[in-house]
Image (spheres, helix red, strand yellow):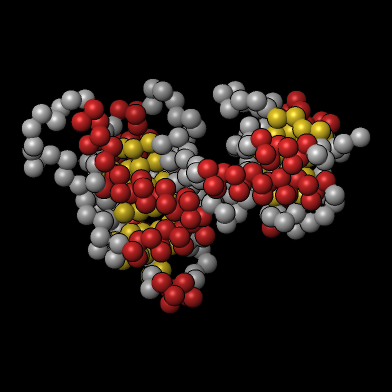
Amino acid sequence: MKPKIFISRPIPDTVVNRLTEVCEVDMWPTSQTLPPIGEKIFNLDGLMTYGHEPVTAYMMDSAPNLKVITAVGVGYDHIDAIEAKKRQISVGNTPDVLSDTTADMTFALLLSAARNIVRGNTFVQNEEWSYYDPNILWGQEVHHATIGIVGMGRIGYSVAKRALGFDMRVLYNKRTRRPDWEVDLGIEHVELDELLKMSDFVTLHPPMSSETYHLIGERELGLMKSNAILVNIARGPIVDGQALYRALKDGQIAGAALDVTEPEPINPGHLLLTLDNLIICPHLGSATHQTRMKMANMAADNILAGLKGEPLPYEVIETR
């Protein structure tokens, strides 16, 4: 009998076909409704999560045959990896492959916010562009500006490399300082408060944890320059949405661009949606054909290895 796996959202057919050769595959057919992982898990040998629905110790206890769980993505804060380890369940993710793609998206958001790209497009589509006006939609210059990168992992490193292409001064904040990166890239390590005070652009890339929940709140936003722009492409709850609304509405900072929100999707009546100095995208950080295909194949590699009882090729540190 083939081992049973559940995939929580649709993935490319070519990857499903790979898995079907070895597994009995049950794939939730839509992203419009939440996958019933709790109802499916009890008889599974493998679980592939594509989203942020929790996988808890209680759920694992109901699945005596479960050998492997993999996230399709870098973040796995929704999977209790420590509890999985206790139950001899391997946990994997898909690191590295999306670092450059997500860094591209970071700069796309930064440039869009700095140069009023979205507002300019809306201005034209609303048929307001009836004559040339040199005094509308002035933005902020990116070249020679100072960027502050919070959370200097793989994605932050890739953002720094792009920033150097714009001749920017690069500051970074990371729990574990990287002198080698400072030498290689010519970047500067500073404490978070100093980074917020000195930066024209602040980009957020830390992992989601209890320590980073609302890392950027009223106090931190109050430290930023009045012409500063905040970009969050990590996790929505890293920023206090209510504090961000007030800071943007009151002109405390110039603008923000979010690829992630709290909650996700953002509620239709959320006050942030009333602001014209804010850009929000529906979590597109890794959304390219090439990267999403690689992510799905890496997750499949994790599943197939775990079912064989082999070390996962992309195993998280907690279960190695």
Please, is residue 103 above or below residue 281 in the view?
below
Q: In percent of the image, x 63 and y 32: which residue is there?
A: 10
Please, is residue 91 above or below residue 282 in the view?
below
Q: In percent of the image, x 24 and y 42: which residue is there?
A: 116
Q: Is residue 248 left or right of residue 57?
A: left
Q: In percent of the image, x 60 and y 37: which residue is there?
A: 51
Residue 2, quarter of picture: top right
Q: Pick the residue in front: 237 or 305.
A: 305
Quarter of the figure with the N terminus: top right
Q: Position of residue 41 (x, y in %)?
A: 77, 32
Q: Pick the residue in front: 67 or 128.
A: 128
Q: Pick the residue in front: 230 or 212.
A: 230
Q: In percent of the image, x 73 and y 37: which residue is there?
A: 17
Does residue 209 show up?
Answer: no
Q: How many marks?
A: 0
Q: Is residue 310 left or right of residue 181?
A: right
Quarter of the figure with the C terminus: bottom right
Q: Is residue 292 left or right of residue 184?
A: right
Does residue 68 show up?
Answer: yes
Q: Position of residue 86 (x, y in %)?
A: 80, 49
Q: Position of residue 269 (x, y in %)?
A: 39, 22
Please, is residue 140 above or below residue 189 in the view?
above
Q: Position of residue 289 (x, y in %)?
A: 53, 43
